[in-house]
Amino acid sequence: MQFVTVFVGGEEVGLPIGCVREIVEHRPVTRVPSMPSAIRGVTNLRGRVVPVVDLAGALRLGARTADRWSCFAVVEVSFDGDKLLLALHADAIGRVLELGDGEVLPPPTFGTRVRLDYLVGMAAVDDRFALLLDIGRVLSPAELLAASSLREEAGRE
């Protein structure tokens, strides 16, 4: 199993490498009224309208502001039978983890600041743990619907 890690709110979180399309530098975000708080707005990614997710906010790790290390992890998630591109705002890029059998540990039943149902597990990295996300569960169906509607609205223009 392979995961790409990013840093968010002081935590190293792993995204399944199969859903990560690319990592790009932070770019301008256009706010969109009436969006859920986890949806920051949209960004222009080579002419495509891509919803931007405040990953720290979605994981309830506190509000984050962009700095020179900030980046977007562009991921593809399944929603309503379709593929949806999302730009996850992260504080910094981490590394690629290649994990063998037995290296993915079950999520702890206590002590993590991230909801357990968002995790597929955790992995030992140096002297700490990386939280391995189930990216399809981080956003609620209502948040995914809102993100999907941003793409549909842009396609009509």
Image (cartoon, rainbow, N blue to C red):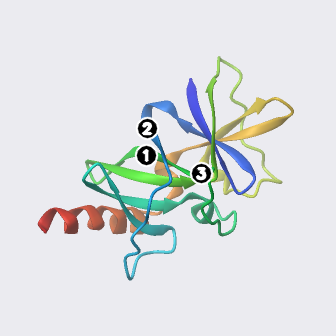
Earlier in the chain: of badge 3 and badge 2, it is: 2
Going by the numbered disc 2, the residue's amino acid type is: Glu
Element under label 3? helix
Report the residue that reaches farthest toward the bottom.
34
Element under label 1? strand
Where is mark 3, residue-wise? 118
Please tell me the numbered disc located at residue 22. Answer: 2
Q: Position of residue 81 (x, y in %)?
A: 25, 48
Q: Mark 2 near mark 1, Cβ–Cβ under 8 Å?
A: yes
The C terminus is located in which quarter? Answer: bottom left
Earlier in the chain: of badge 1 and badge 3, it is: 1
Going by the numbered disc 1, the residue's amino acid type is: Val
Going by the numbered disc 3, the residue's amino acid type is: Tyr
- In the picture provided, is 148 more to the left or to the right than 139? left
Where is mark 1, residue-wise? 74
Closer-to-camera residue (17/114): 17
Element under label 2? strand
Report the residue that reaches farthest toward the right.
127
Which residue does the image show at 83% across and 54% down from the upper left?
111
Q: Mark 1 near mark 3, Cβ–Cβ under 8 Å?
A: no
Q: Position of residue 115 (x, y in %)?
A: 66, 57
- In the picture provided, is 146 more to the left or to the right than 115? left
Give the quadrant of residue 124. top right
